[in-house]
Image (cartoon, rainbow, N blue to C red):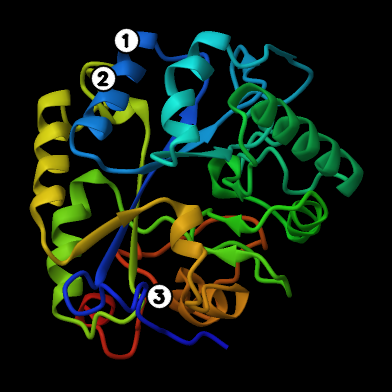
Amino acid sequence: MCTLHPLDTSLAATQTISVVFRYDDYGNERSLQHETVLREAFAKYDIPATYGIIPYPSIGDVGEPGPHEVRALELSKAELIKDMVQAGKIEAALHGYSHHTRWLWPYSEFAGADITEQRRKITAGKLLLEEMLGVEIVTFIPPWNTYDTDTVRALEDAGFRTLSSGASGPVTPSNLAVLPATCGLGELQSAVEYVRGLDGRGYVIVVLFHAYNFVEVDTKHGTLNYEEFERLLEWVARQPDVSVSTLKQAAGVETGYNMDCLREHGVSRMRPPLLPTPPFVGGDMRPLLYYPADFTQSEYYRG
């Protein structure tokens, strides 16, 4: 059963909107300069974030199935964030193993793989990050937001406590806390304003973004620059009713964010019944914006 409670009863009167920044694909591909800019921006405004870290990034085209070489996360990348990770300002989450797809489409590193292989990858990746960063890794972010029921079993076996993917992943009995991504950087302010009009009980906005969202990294597909990103963080820091946390912190409160909640409030609730999709495939008809979503009362979802 999905039961909503205030995220933090001591802050419920003044800080009812919970925001989590989820930065995926932290690995060897992007420059140290880029990663330093983001690290310093979060530190400047004292805003925590969850980093989805690839422990053994694939060398080559991650979207091309088949055998591939991997290289362990560069020491410089681990050292750049290690102090903030150990201070609890950055949560290190396991973002797959190599982030290399098994399928041509839909992309997935884990869905459809034998559970033994999934256990091996999850355990090896967790071990490397824990050795490099000196903290326990308890949150898993599947590459391309895709996983299957065996992934859930493997995560439980490895001691994980939180899963963050999309809002249309397979639902299976589990003790894992589940907090899906709900919007991108460009939708954050609108999401906060929208949630302000709700009852404010237990809603979370999980902001998913990648390096390629920045024009300094990808001039063709980027949607904002570093200066605009800083202004966004500044805006968040100035909101008296917004509390920013990591996925681990948000999931650590008794809020009922579990598989039952995903079943009741995930995007799969919005799919027409005559258009089923495979259990690990996306197919979101509209971004969640916030979670748990209320599809019966919200004009956003009815519109």
* CA distance separating discs 2 and 1: 6 Å
Identified by mark 3, the residue type is Pro
Instruction: Estimate the x, y position of residue 248 in percent, counting from the top left.
Output: 51, 54
Element assignment for label 2: helix
Q: Give the residue pinned by disc 3.
A: 292
Q: Observer-nearest residue: 251 or 64?
A: 251
* CA distance separating discs 1 and 3: 36 Å
Q: Observer-nearest residue: 79 or 121?
A: 79
Instruction: Estimate the x, y position of residue 293 in percent, counting from the top left.
Output: 36, 76
Q: Earlier in the sequence, mark 3 or mark 2?
A: 2
Identified by mark 1, the residue type is Gln
Identify whether 282 is placed above or below 253: above
Q: Nearer the viewer, mark 1 or mark 3?
A: 1
Identified by mark 2, the residue type is Val
Q: Count neighbours of disc 2 (C-alpha within 10 A) and say few if under 14, some if 14 to 19, many if 20 or more.
A: few
- Label annotation for residue 37: 2
In the image, taking residue 218 as reference, residue 115 lies left or right, namely right
Q: Count neighbours of disc 1 (C-alpha within 10 A) and say few if under 14, some if 14 to 19, many if 20 or more.
A: few
Q: Give the residue pinned by disc 1.
A: 33
Q: Observer-nearest residue: 213 or 197?
A: 197
Assess whether mark 1 and mark 2 are in contact (beta carbons under 8 angstroms). yes
In the image, taking residue 2 as reference, residue 246 lies left or right, namely left
Q: How many marks?
A: 3
* CA distance separating discs 3 and 2: 32 Å
Instruction: Estimate the x, y position of residue 217 in percent, counting from the top left.
Output: 29, 17
Q: Earlier in the sequence, mark 1 or mark 3?
A: 1
Q: Count neighbours of disc 3 (C-alpha within 10 A) and say few if under 14, some if 14 to 19, many if 20 or more.
A: many
Instruction: Estimate the x, y position of residue 41 in percent, counting from the top left.
Output: 22, 29
